[in-house]
Amino acid sequence: MVAALIVATLGITTPSAAPARAAGGAPHHTPTAPRSAEAGRWVEGTFTAPAGSRRYKLYVPGSYDPSRRHVLVVLLHGCTQDPDDLARGTRVAEHAEREGFLALLPEQPASANPKKCWNWYDPAHQARGAGEPSLIEGMTAQVARDYAVDPARVHLAGISAGAAMASLVAVAYPERYASLALHSGLAWRPATDVMGALAAMAKGVADPDALGAAAFAAMGERARAIPTFVIHGGSDAVVAPTNGSQAARQWAATNARALGVAALAARDSASGTEGGYAWTRSCYADGREAAGRCLVEELVVRELGHAWSGGSASGTFADERGPDATREMVRFFGEHPMTRAARPAVPAERR
């Protein structure tokens, strides 16, 4: 039953061949309207690169000012969703309007996956310079050039398959994203085929610490600690709750290696209730600092299923009860700009 629910909900299919490559090698970006005319509105556009083409929606708040730098939040939808659906369920535009950040929502079409899932379990989409990670990062970079974006405050988030892909993108392009947020997701690269994906979603992975070491190695010379916020439902029947704790553990291991320490130190722990759901929060910090920053924060919402916590019922996979996940992610992002010392040089092709 669980496997059938996973397949039906997340649309796992046999991995396709490597994605078709567009003619020519230079990325191409086509916004439908100039930025100055779209403040306070959704802008639709298309990004095209050698790995293919993806549409997106970009929310530009009414307070957007091209004379100053703004935060950019990139948010990846889950299976069967699209940017409109995700925007409704997360209320991301309301938060962007209130906080003054830009929100970029890439779209995974049915032509790339029958259920619109990001292909996180397919090796063709798990590394730098190819597949969907290259499209998401390329789109991020182009929007950052077209708009007044602070390169130290570009953040990445996703839900479910979008969260699994977000981890892959962050490891592939650590110089691009200041921090990461994973909702109802998994550890980094937990599977490389369909059966492995089903097993991971149902039972988690064998060794999240080993994945943490592998993720650090995959970053190569660009390796850095990436502050990560993990939120998961304790009653998730699609992506088992153990995946949330394993994602936090994997990122703690990755970040510890990036910092050159044996492990992150357990800091504050708290619990409470919000919207009728009980929650527990844990924090893991750099033990070298007396009041170390929370580099990995895990929020478990006990009664929450496979849904965006504190979201809007106008979107799918969203539960109006529980802590507001969008609010918590935005708060975490605000606490974690990329410092100059921690920011690797952006490769020449992205300058």
Image (cartoon, grey):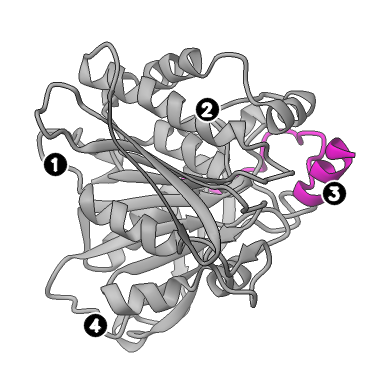
- Compare marks 1 and 4 and give the one earlier in the sequence: 4
Whole-angstrom CA distance, mark 4 to mark 3, is 41 Å
Q: Which mark is residue 8?
A: 3
> Relative to 304, is 214 on the left or the right?
left
Residue 26 visible, this angle: no
x and y, in percent, of residue 213 in the image: 41, 14
Asked which secondary structure carries label 4, the reply is: loop
| In the rendered image, the vertical position of residue 220 relative to residue 293, given as above or below | above
- Compare marks 4 and 2 and give the one earlier in the sequence: 4
Give the number of the mark in front: 4 or 3.
Answer: 3
- Compare marks 4 and 3 and give the one earlier in the sequence: 3
- Disc 1 to disc 2: CB gap under 8 Å: no
Give the quarter of the figure containing the N terminus. top right
x and y, in percent, of residue 206 in the image: 62, 14
Q: Which mark is residue 114?
A: none
Near-viewer residue (316 or 124): 316
